[in-house]
Amino acid sequence: MSPPRITVTAKAVKSDEASVPVHLWDEKIMELFPWLVERCQADESSAQKLQKTLYWLRGRCLRWWKTSVIRKFHEWFHGTEHVSDNQGDIETWGIRMIGQLKMASWWEWQGGSTPFFWR
């Protein structure tokens, strides 16, 4: 038996006080491993381990994404000719945006957000 399906009809906006709907992410991941869901429904300790594993997996995926974005900036910056007058400004903005990226979670941009101009 799978968890109940929830239909989200609101826009992709979360009020500041609302909790993050982590269960939506978890459901998508669990669809890939139906055998694991069955096992967790039979054993409470396995269900707790699954929640910890999903939390860990979200962290690893976020870390991979951040590393990928930072690497792409460096590849773009060092692989593209920039007008020499603007190179310092471009690097400064890139470093600022990487700082914002490092403070971000999957659901919030605690350090602010700016479009990645190198993508």
Image (cartoon, rainbow, N blue to C red):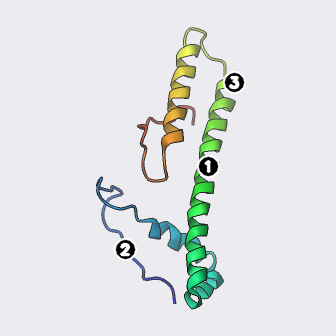
Q: Earlier in the sequence, mark 1 or mark 3?
A: 1
The residues tagged by marks 3 and 2 sit, at their Cα atoms, a distance apart of: 45 Å
Report, in whole angstroms, how far the alpha carbon at label 2 lies from the one at label 1.
29 Å
Q: Is residue 65 above or below residue 9?
A: above
Q: Amino acid at mark 1?
A: Arg
CA gap, disc 1 and disc 3: 23 Å
- Closer to the eye: label 2 or 1: 1
Q: Quadrant of residue 113?
A: top left
Identity, as a three-letter code, of the amino acid under mark 3: His
Among numbered discs 2 and 1, the one appearing first in the sequence: 2
For the residues labelled 3 and 2, say whether their Cβ atoms are less than 8 Å apart. Answer: no
Label 1, secondary structure: give it.
Answer: helix
Q: Where is residue 56 shown, x and y percent of the image? A: 60, 62
Q: Residue at x 64, y 25 (%)?
A: 77
Q: Residue at x 44, y 53 (%)?
A: 107
In terms of sequence position, does the residue under pointer 3 or pointer 2 come before the other?
A: 2
**Label 3 Cα crowd, 10 Å radius (few <14 / some 14-19 / many 20+):** few
Where is 37 relative to 94, above or below?
below
Q: Nearer the viewer, mark 1 or mark 3?
A: 1
The amino acid beneath tag 2 is: Thr
Residue 71 as seen in the image, left or right of residue 94 = right
Which secondary structure, mark 2? loop
**Residue at image point 36% right, 57% down:** 12
Q: Badge 2 is on which residue?
A: 7
In which quadrant is the C terminus drawn? top right
Under tag 3, what secondary structure? helix
Query: What residue does disc 1 label?
Result: 63
Mark sitting on residue 78: 3
Q: Give the side of residue 38 with respect to residue 106, left or right.
A: right
Taking the view exactly as shown, the residue that stands out farthest to the front is 45
Q: Residue furthest top?
A: 85
Give the total of numbered labels.
3
